[in-house]
Image (cartoon, rainbow, N blue to C red):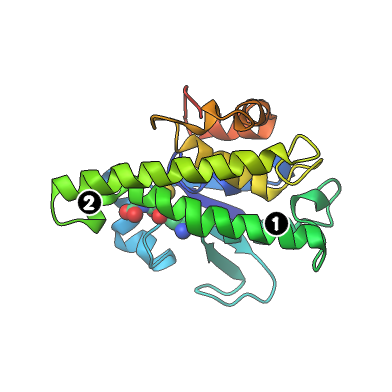
Amino acid sequence: MTQLFYSPGTACLAPHFLLEELGLPYELVLVDTSKQEHQQEAYLRLNPKGKIPLLIDTTEGAEEVDKGMFYLTESAAICLYLADKYATQQNASHFCPPLASLERARLYQWMMYFSNTLQAELLSYFYPERLADNAQTAEQIKQHAEQRVAEMLSYIDAELAQSEGDFFLGKSLSIADLFLFMLCRWTRNMHKPARTYKHLAPYLARLVERPAIKNSFAQEGLVHPLY
Ligand SMILES: N[C@@H](CCC(=O)N[C@@H](CS)C(=O)NCC(=O)O)C(=O)O
């Protein structure tokens, strides 16, 4: 059985969208961050980083923590793993283009950019107090992070304008779309949210209509504005 440990609206969303898109049986396990459950021993035993998400998958040969169970963290890595694992399933090969193809290289490029640049900046925006000694500096960090996110969104918007299809990498939905949608959602309360950019606006409006994305939002109890 595949289990996704989640906290509503967090970095669990992209893997959640993907599990829904794949139509796989899986279990959602709530980690209640308002009760600091992610910092408690029971969760730290599974994920010593104390972060969300965590995927536990039953995989032959895996011997981490419990025999036969595979523990994986990092939202982008979970998406890559699931997409590869189920690539041979009917209608699933487009989530991750074939190994060593140019399309695959572009997917890596964007997944890395999204996770180690845009997502990292968003984490500074959401947790500025972790980078500062006082409230005034934290506020300044938050403002700078928001400006930098806006620059990144402009760059992403320009890239999207070059797409030859409805999706970020062209004509097929890939994990880059699911990951980017999650990050765009996180900008919804900024002065210039992703939904206000010329090319991101119709792109996000199309994605939010996908049943997999709607189901994920409903299951996590998320309501409007969704992005
Ligand atoms: N790079 C990690 C980031 C994980 C992360 O920071 N998750 C946040 C929620 S979006 C979290 O667990 N926050 C709780 C905390 O930092 O205390 C990933 O993509 O999985």
Q: Position of residue 172 (x, y in %)?
A: 80, 42
Which one is nearer the viewer's eye here, 77 or 167? 167
Which one is nearer the viewer's eye here, 95 or 71? 95
Quick check: is the Cβ at mark 1 less than 8 Å away from ligand 1? no
Classify the position of the N terminus by image quarter.
bottom right
Q: Position of residue 190 (x, y in %)?
A: 39, 32
Which one is nearer the viewer's eye here, 203 or 143? 143
Q: Which quarter holds ligand 1?
A: bottom left
Name the residue at the top extreme. 224
Q: Quarter of the image holding residue 20?
A: top right
Q: Amino acid at mark 1?
A: Leu
Disc 2 to disc 1, C-alpha distance: 33 Å
Question: Mark number for residue 107?
Answer: 1
Q: Amino acid at mark 2?
A: Glu
Compared across the picture, whether 99 is left or right of 217 comes to: right
Q: Position of residue 210 (x, y in %)?
A: 69, 30
Compared across the picture, whether 158 is left or right of 71 comes to: right
Q: Quarter of the image holding residue 198?
A: top right
Quick check: is the Cβ at mark 2 less than 8 Å away from ligand 1? no
Q: Position of residue 137 (x, y in %)?
A: 18, 50
- Above or below, 205 relative to 7: above
Question: Mark number for residue 129?
Answer: 2
Question: Mark number for residue 182?
Answer: none
Per the image, label 2 sits on a secondary structure element best described as: helix
Per the image, label 1 sits on a secondary structure element best described as: helix
Compared across the picture, whether 195 is left or right of 167 comes to: left
Asked if one can make out residue 17 in the rendered structure from this viewpoint, the answer is no
